[in-house]
Image: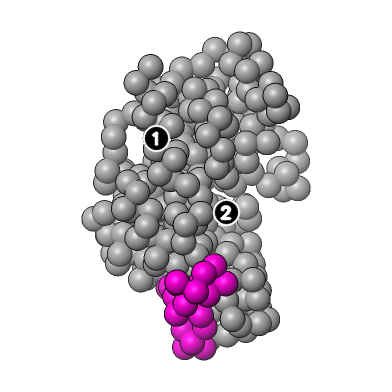
């Protein structure tokens, strides 16, 4: 038995848990278009990225077809300041380009192949803009928009946060989006721009100064706490429960790990396999 499973079993025995988490009304979460009513969110990590090239329209369409309740995606800025959907600071691993994404204009990025690295079947897939994804998702599926640290600056006006938020509002998706970032400046900026926009802290050990989730969420006026399954230790989980904080856990692709976390009552899980996660969550709910 893995250390993680032993730890999860121990937590389940020592910390009272419920399959349905009750949140404080102080926290604002996005409304789901296809909510199945179980208080658990199936989140497609970079789309259905186990089956499609990550952060592409193919991956997002696949996630919708697999009945994911939310799509997670990453936002960077092109050289000419356009929010584009891509995870890495450099292009080599997931396109046929090279160098830093921020050195390319949008027109230059559109020339790159973002699918062949995954499979010849997806040759010709492009790096989408955030606007493209919002146009696709509108009226269909909620989004978790992660603002990448590489795109964040100290400036609030004209930054990636303001540009992304403006697009979200242009497409009427402000009630269906959860922003997140490992860079806590991004959360601060978003809440300065619009205190009502849902935003989650992505736990950053270096920036957190050993503070508990409740202290961090309070300090940055966040609405949720996102972390890896390794970071969801007993102390943090107890603090999260005592303060009724929504918690979303990444990136979980193993069936047994999914089951244990769902049983612990986490708010949602990011997975490259949203189809598998939905199956596991449904089986847990049936029991």
> Mark 1 sits on what residue?
279
At x 42%, y 27%, the residue is 23
Q: Which residues are magenta?
A: 107-129
Image quadrant where residue 249 sits: top right
Image quadrant where residue 48 sits: bottom left
Q: Secondary structure at mark 1?
A: helix
- Which residue is outermost to the left? 139
At x 26%, y 54%, the residue is 140
How many other residues sit within 10 Å of disc 1, few (<14), some (14-19) or many (≥20)?
few
Percent position (x, y) of residue 106?
A: 48, 84
Q: Secondary structure at mark 2?
A: strand
Percent position (x, y) of residue 228?
A: 62, 41
Q: Which mark is residue 215?
A: none
Q: Is residue 274 above or below residue 183?
A: above
Q: Earlier in the sequence, mark 1 or mark 2?
A: 2
Q: Nearer the viewer, residue 93 or 37?
A: 93
Q: CA distance from mark 1 to mark 2?
A: 28 Å
Residue 73 visible, this orientation: no
Left/right of residue 66 with respect to residue 145 in the rendered view: left
At x 35%, y 60%, the residue is 61
Whether residue 114 appears in magenta in the rendering, the answer is: yes
At x 57%, y 85%, the residue is 104
Image quadrant holding the C terminus, namely top left
Q: Nearer the viewer, residue 93 or 243?
A: 93
Magenta stretch secondary structure, dominant = loop
Whether residue 44 appears in magenta in the rendering, the answer is: no
Residue 182 visible, this orientation: yes
Q: Is residue 126 above or below residue 202?
A: below
| Color style of the picture | one colour
> Mark 2 sits on what residue?
181
Q: Nearer the viewer, mark 1 or mark 2?
A: 1
Left/right of residue 160 with respect to residue 20 in the rendered view: right
């Amino acid at each position: 038995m893995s250390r993680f499973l032993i730890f999860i079993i121990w937590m389940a025995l020592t910390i009272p848990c419920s399959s349905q988490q009750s949140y404080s009304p102080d926290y604002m979460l996005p409304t789901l278009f296809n909510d199945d009513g179980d208080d658990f969110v199936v989140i497609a990590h970079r789309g259905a990225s186990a089956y499609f090239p990550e952060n592409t329209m193919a991956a997002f369409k696949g996630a919708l077809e697999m009945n994911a309740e939310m799509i997670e995606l990453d936002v960077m800025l092109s050289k000419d300041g356009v929010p584009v959907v891509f995870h890495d600071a450099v292009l080599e691993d997931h396109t046929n380009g090279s160098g830093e994404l921020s050195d390319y204009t949008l027109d230059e990025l559109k020339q790159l192949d973002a699918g062949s690295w995954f499979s010849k079947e997806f040759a010709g897939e492009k790096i989408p803009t955030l606007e493209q994804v919002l146009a696709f998702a509108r009226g269909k599926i909620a989004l978790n928009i992660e603002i990448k640290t590489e795109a964040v600056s100290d400036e609030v006006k004209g930054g990636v946060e303001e540009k992304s938020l403006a697009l979200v509002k242009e497409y009427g998706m402000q009630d269906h989006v959860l922003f997140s970032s490992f860079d806590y400046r991004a959360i601060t900026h978003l809440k300065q721009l619009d205190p009502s926009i849902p935003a989650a802290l992505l736990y950053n050990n270096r920036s957190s100064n050993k503070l508990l989730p409740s202290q961090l969420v309070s300090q940055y006026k966040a609405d949720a706490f996102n972390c890896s399954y390794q970071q969801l230790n007993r102390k943090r989980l107890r603090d999260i429960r005592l303060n009724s904080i929504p918690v979303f856990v990444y990136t979980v692709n193993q069936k047994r790990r999914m089951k244990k976390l769902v049983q612990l009552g986490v708010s949602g899980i990011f997975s490259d396999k949203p189809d598998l996660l939905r199956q596991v969550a449904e089986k847990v709910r049936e029991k």
